Image (cartoon, grey):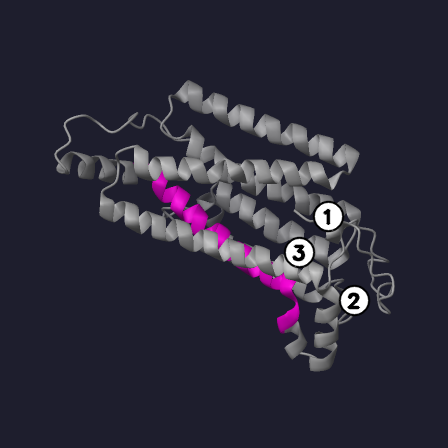
């Protein structure tokens, strides 16, 4: 993964020092010109596009979002992770300070951990599930401390990438090898899996185009003028696409790890004429 954005410094931006938050100090600086639209927000589109994370975190808080409880009690760990990314990424892009960049980066680790935890703790005994959860979050906390103390972005990237690498194999295992789903159900679940993945890949591609072709994008934006130029703020589109992809994947994980869905899967399992139970019947959910 390229870390080009970690070394780019747009010191030539005429408005970089005009903001109320002072001159940007973050190690990461993106293609959007600092404080070009308002002195109150460093990267206007990159900041506001984070509203997508917040909206989706609150719109799809958990599998049973219609429960008659206050809204804040409907948030599961995945929604909290997505909400944290939206808030802290927005604060970071609004200020472009190193301290707020760290908050943004750490919230990404929380979100990644929230995707891993339910996939591996589900279908385990209470003791094993608790051990998996404890080891996972202690590991994330340890890497977070190392990253903050060192300031080495490679540590954050490696940790985040490593966590995500644990997500998709477990997803495929639950869909195909636990015996819970019929062929039709597998097809539907994989359609959702690929939809989420494709959306995330599109967002990742736009992010890299924004990094590698910044000069060309800036020239095109200058030629277009506002508000059309905002359409070429590709890092903002990265926020939108990753929020959508993450939300789709979160809903897939909830379905795969919900007790209600597990019971439905077991009924389908026996309806196909199988005499033996699906692999490792669910005993608890964390």
Q: Residue sitting at 79 percent across and 47 percent down? A: 98
For the residues labelled 3 and 2, say whether their Cβ atoms are less than 8 Å apart: no
From the image, tell me which residue sits under label 1.
101
Image position of 139 with respect to 44: above or below: above
| Rendered position, 187 above or below 120 | below
Dot 3 or dot 2, earlier in sequence: 2
Q: Residues within 10 Å of mark 2 (few under 14, many from 20)?
A: many
Label 2 vs label 1: CA separation? 17 Å
Q: Nearer the viewer, residue 281 or 215?
A: 215
Quadrant where the C terminus is found in the figure: top left
Q: Are marks 2 and 1 in contact (CB under 8 Å)?
A: no
The 10 Å Cα crowd at callout 3, few under 14, some 14 to 19, many 20 or more, is: many
Dot 1 crowding, Cα within 10 Å, few <14, some 14–19, many 20+: many
Residue beneath the point at 44% across and 48% down: 249
Q: Which residue appears at 77% of the width and 66% of the height?
A: 33
Task: Identify the residue under disc 3.
Answer: 90
Locate residue 216, reporting x and y percent. Answer: 72, 70
Secondary structure under the numbered disc 1 in the rendered image: helix
The chief SS type of the magenta part is helix
| Residue drawn at point x = 41 percent, y = 42 percent | 253
Q: Secondary structure at mark 3?
A: helix
**Relative to residue 45, is residue 7 drawn left or right?**
right
Count of residue discs = 3
Over which residues does the magenta segment extend?
231-259
Residue 153 position by quadrant: top right
The local secondary structure at tag 2 comes to loop
Q: Is residue 184 above or below residue 263?
A: below
Q: CA distance from mark 3 to mark 2?
A: 14 Å
Residue with the mark numbered 2: 35
In this view, the residue in front, 58 or 94, is: 94
**Whole-percent x and y of residue 17?**
87, 63
Nearer the camera: disc 1 or disc 3: 1
């Amino acid at each position: 993964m390229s870390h080009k954005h970690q070394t780019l410094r747009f010191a030539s931006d005429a408005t970089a020092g005009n903001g109320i938050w002072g001159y940007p100090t973050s190690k990461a600086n993106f293609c959007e010109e600092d404080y070009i639209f308002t002195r109150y927000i460093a990267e206007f589109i990159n900041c506001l596009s984070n509203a997508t994370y917040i909206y989706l975190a609150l719109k799809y808080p958990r599998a049973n979002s219609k429960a008659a409880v206050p809204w804040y009690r409907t948030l599961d760990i995945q929604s909290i992770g997505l909400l944290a990314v939206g808030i802290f990424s927005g604060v970071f892009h609004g200020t472009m300070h190193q301290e707020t960049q760290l908050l943004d980066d750490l919230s990404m680790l929380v979100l990644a951990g929230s995707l891993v935890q339910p996939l591996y703790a589900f279908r385990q005994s209470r003791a094993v599930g608790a051990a998996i959860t404890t080891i996972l979050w202690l590991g994330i906390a340890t890497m977070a401390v190392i990253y903050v103390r060192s300031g080495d972005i490679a540590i954050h990237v490696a940790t985040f990438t490593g966590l995500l690498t644990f997500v998709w194999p477990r997803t495929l295992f639950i869909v195909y090898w636990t015996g819970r789903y019929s062929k039709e159900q597998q097809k539907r679940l994989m359609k959702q899996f690929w939809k989420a993945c494709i959306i995330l890949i599109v967002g990742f591609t736009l992010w890299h185009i924004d990094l590698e072709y910044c000069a060309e994008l800036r020239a095109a934006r200058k030629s277009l003028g506002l508000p059309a130029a905002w359409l070429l703020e590709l890092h903002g589109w990265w926020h939108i696409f990753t929020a959508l992809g993450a939300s789709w994947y979160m809903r897939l994980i909830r379905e795969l790890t919900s007790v209600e869905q597990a019971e439905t899967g077991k009924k389908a399992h026996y309806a196909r004429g199988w005499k033996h139970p699906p692999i490792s019947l669910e005993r608890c959910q964390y």
